[in-house]
Image: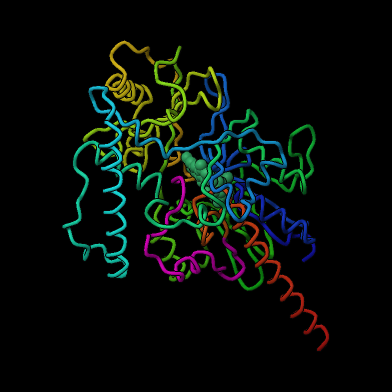
């Protein structure tokens, strides 16, 4: 029918916006974007904190300086986004014990190299046993001491590239840049949106973008898709691009009618969701070391991941007096469930272990909630190390008129902004092909009449 938009895009994160842009550029202008929250950007989100703009979600442009050019780096260059070079490979030389002593660099380097060797061995064994972790011999050293646990955390939660090749760094290069722009990382999305949506004075006014529309049901058949939102609205389209996170797909936020086929559900269930939380703390003055190779520092504790990974923001915003500590998975969920005041006390305890009892209390804290947010349910996807091509294929394969997008559908770059960006482009290209095929089929049947 003529009145319904041909494509509805669910989600206005980087993948939804890049998908919509490709469709619009290829003549599919009758599209509608339904976004659950009150903004575009999704997991790219800035917030004003302590007088500067901090990134609650994606913070780095990862993979720069290699043989191929990272498309997100290009977008950043084009829109003049302010970034600064950031290198956490030195973090291992700033590991504090609980009495505030820094481990000698020789000790740290040895433990690090041992951990890398053991991780590689383990990976090889898993590969040998086709991913069956239970067959991996327990002889391999498991981290036990605080420094071993700290290094295990840095290695597995930050520097996987040391253990296995990661396409982002192999293809695009090993450098990483921290976004330090008052307009936020999300400025890149507004620049993209400007190309195909009506904007005025920095605001998107195009009524094809509908905010605060929580999709709860997708009814799909051979003829089209009906989308129902929480506020009782009903939208119809020929096709849907679903760009919500893997965490949302695993939750029951969106009902499918008929249900998704088994091969799709199984793939969705198997994909791991990583929770990654950056906690921001504002101080009246600096008490941590500055200067080259001091941007990152580590706290070694007998509990793995307990306020382990720290960063100061002086390179990005000199004089901001802000520290960032990163928690993951279990620790993220634990902290999300408790009052911020408790988290502040815990973080201060850790800082006093490292820097002594006389440091000032933080005057403000910001704890993003990526796990409890029902429009996210986690920070990004993680394919099991030994995952086969079939799993990625099933994650991104369309089901009838529903096409899937989002960082988790990117075979090589899942978990990154450029993964989401490229996934949006891929999904739209696949959909455009399908639309053309459908047109040809229609023309053929018309000709027969
Ligand atoms: P999203 O951005 O999640 O977009 C999906 C959209 O769908 C959201 O806006 C959501 O509100 C909406 N939605 C959900 N449910 C519904 C519904 N039912 N109805 C309507 N709309 C719905 N990447 C990097 O490259 N570098 C980094 O340094 C980095 N760090 C990160 C740190 C954190 C804390 C997090 C969370 C992520 C980080 N990432 C990083 C990953 C990167 O942010 C993501 O890969 C990327 O932004 C995902 O984009 P997306 O479009 O796939 O999903």
On screen, residue 100 versus residue 181, left or right, reads: left
Residue 146, quarter of picture: top left
Residue 55, magenta (yes or no) = no
Query: Is residue 375 shown to the viewer in this render?
Result: no
Q: Residue at x 45, y 40 (%)?
A: 370
Residue 199 percent location from the top left of the image: 78, 39
Q: Which residue of the protein is positioned furthest toward the bottom in this rendering?
A: 448
Q: Which residue of the protein is positioned furthest toward the front in this rendering?
A: 106
Q: Residue at x 29, y 70 (%)?
A: 128
| Viewer-side residue, 360 vs 443 | 360
Q: Residue at x 63, y 52 (%)?
A: 69
Residue 136 percent location from the top left of the image: 22, 63
Query: Is residue 399 shown to the viewer in this render?
Result: yes
**Segment tinted magenta in the rendering:** 377-404
| 256 in relation to 415, above or below | below
| 274 in relation to 449, above or below | above
On screen, residue 213 versus residue 129, left or right, reads: right
Quadrant (top left/top right/bottom left/bottom right) for the C terminus: bottom right
Counting every numbered tag in the picture gives 0
Residue 99 percent location from the top left of the image: 23, 22
On screen, residue 211 versus residue 265, left or right, reads: right
The colour style of the image is rainbow
Q: Which residue of the protein is positioned furthest toward the left in this rendering?
A: 139
On screen, residue 203 versus residue 337, left or right, reads: right
Residue 397, magenta (yes or no) = yes
Quadrant (top left/top right/bottom left/bottom right) for the N terminus: bottom right
| 105 in relation to 256, above or below | above
Q: Residue at x 32, y 38 (%)?
A: 331
Residue 42 percent location from the top left of the image: 57, 43
């Amino acid at each position: 029918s003529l009145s319904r938009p041909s494509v509805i895009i669910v989600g206005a994160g980087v993948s939804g916006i890049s998908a919509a842009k490709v469709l619009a550029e290829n003549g599919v202008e009758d599209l509608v974007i339904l976004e659950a929250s009150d903004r575009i950007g999704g997991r790219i989100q800035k917030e004003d904190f302590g007088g500067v703009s901090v990134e609650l979600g994606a913070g780095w442009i990862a993979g720069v300086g290699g043989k191929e050019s990272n498309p997100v780096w290009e977008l950043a260059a084009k829109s003049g986004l302010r970034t600064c070079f950031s290198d956490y490979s030195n973090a291992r030389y700033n590991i504090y014990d609980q009495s505030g002593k820094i481990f000698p660099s020789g000790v740290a380097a040895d433990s690090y190299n041992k951990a890398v060797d053991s991780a590689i061995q383990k990976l090889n064994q898993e590969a040998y046993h086709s991913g069956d972790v239970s067959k991996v011999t327990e002889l391999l050293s498991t981290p036990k001491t605080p420094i071993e646990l700290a290094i295990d955390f840095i290695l597995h939660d930050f520097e996987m590239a040391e253990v296995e090749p990661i396409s982002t760094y192999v293809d695009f290069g090993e450098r990483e840049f921290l976004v330090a722009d008052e307009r936020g990382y999300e400025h890149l999305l507004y620049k993209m949106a400007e190309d195909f949506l009506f904007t005025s004075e920095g605001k998107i006014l195009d009524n094809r973008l509908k905010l605060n529309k929580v999709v709860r049901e997708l009814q799909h058949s051979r003829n089209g898709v009906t989308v129902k939102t929480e506020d009782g609205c009903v939208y119809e389209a020929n096709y849907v691009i679903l760009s919500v996170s893997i965490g949302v797909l695993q939750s029951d936020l969106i009902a499918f009618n008929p249900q998704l086929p088994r091969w799709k559900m199984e793939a969705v269930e198997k994909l791991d969701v990583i929770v990654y939380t950056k906690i921001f703390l504002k101080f009246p003055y600096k008490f941590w070391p500055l200067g080259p190779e001091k941007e990152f520092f580590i706290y070694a504790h007998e509990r793995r991941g307990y306020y382990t990974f720290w960063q100061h923001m002086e390179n990005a915003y000199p004089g901001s007096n802000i520290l960032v500590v990163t928690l993951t998975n279990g620790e993220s969920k634990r902290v999300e469930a408790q009052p911020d005041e408790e988290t502040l006390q815990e973080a201060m305890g850790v800082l006093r272990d490292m820097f002594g009892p006389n440091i000032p209390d933080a005057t403000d804290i910001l704890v993003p909630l990526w796990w409890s947010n029902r429009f996210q349910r986690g920070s990004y996807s993680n394919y099991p190390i030994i995952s086969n091509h079939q799993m990625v294929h099933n994650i991104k394969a369309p089901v009838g008129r529903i096409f899937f997008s989002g960082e988790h559908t990117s075979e090589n770059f899942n978990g990154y902004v450029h993964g989401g960006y490229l996934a949006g482009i891929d999904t739209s290209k696949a959909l455009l092909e399908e639309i053309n095929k459908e047109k040809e089929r229609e023309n053929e049947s018309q000709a027969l009449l």
